[in-house]
Image (cartoon, rainbow, N blue to C red):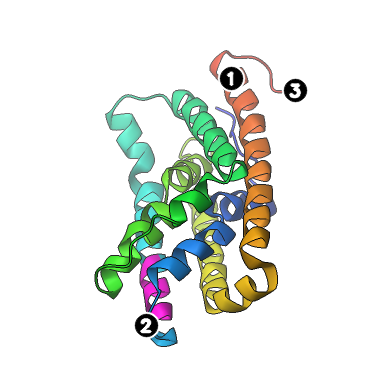
Amino acid sequence: MDAIFPNHVTYEFVTLFVVLDPIASLPVFTAVTAGLSRRQSLLVGFYALAISFLVLLFFIVVGQHLLNALKIPMASFQLAGSLVLLLFGLKMVLGKISEEADTVGTAGGLFERAVYPLAVPGIAGAGAMLTVVLLTDNNTRSVAEQATTTGILLVCLIIFFVLFTLANAIFRVLGRPGVEIVSRVFGLILASIAVTSLVISIKVSFGIPLG
């Protein structure tokens, strides 16, 4: 079966970076770390990124085996995944992510704040889980290529941490409206990627040549 996503480092980086949407996570990060010291805030960010990596790594390693156990064809998962990514992108374009950030609570310890909603579903949401499974398809990607994708994911999460350290400065420069604009642009890019993937997955499902 043909890969639904091109096996290209730049393409995979852009896809992962956009679907993870670090800009949209900044309001969530600032909300869950309200009232904490800078050290405590960064610790919450580190916990959230570590949890997100473990969750997504689980889907990279086990995701497709789970599909096989449930007898779900990869083509069907690709089609469903493309639809979910499209809806997720539209949600970003419409500003729904920012609206959800406004409802975040600040109760609990550092680890509890990191787990929900920052790590899941903020960073390792449904869109990210679907994307890593599609990018590491066992039928089209070698172990080395899957390891490369995992490395790209790690780079994206490191960039997340850098943005968390600069969160206050970013908010001062962009302001809330600027953050929302950037997030919506990311959403438009993700929706475009999803539409392209949707067309490819339909062709693969019905045996239509991709040319």
The residue nearer to you, when weighing 194 against 4, is 194
Q: Earlier in the sequence, mark 1 or mark 2?
A: 2
Residue 31 coordinates in the image, percent (x, y): 43, 67
| Relative image position of residue 107 (x, y in whole percent) | 27, 67
Query: Which residue is identified by label 2?
Result: 40
In percent of the image, x 53 and y 37: which residue is there?
A: 85
- Amino acid type at mark 2: Gln
Question: In this view of the protein, which residue sits in the foreground, 46 or 133?
Answer: 46
Callout 3 secondary element: loop
Q: For mark 1, does the 10 Å Cα neighbourhood hold few (<14), some (14 to 19), or many (20 or more) residues?
A: some
Type of residue at label 1?
Ile
Q: Which residues are magenta?
A: 41-48
Residue sitting nearer the eye, 129 or 112: 112
**Residue receiving disc 1:** 202
First of labels 2, 3 by sequence position: 2
Q: Provide the secondary structure element on which disc 2 rests.
A: helix
Q: Which mark is residue 211?
A: 3
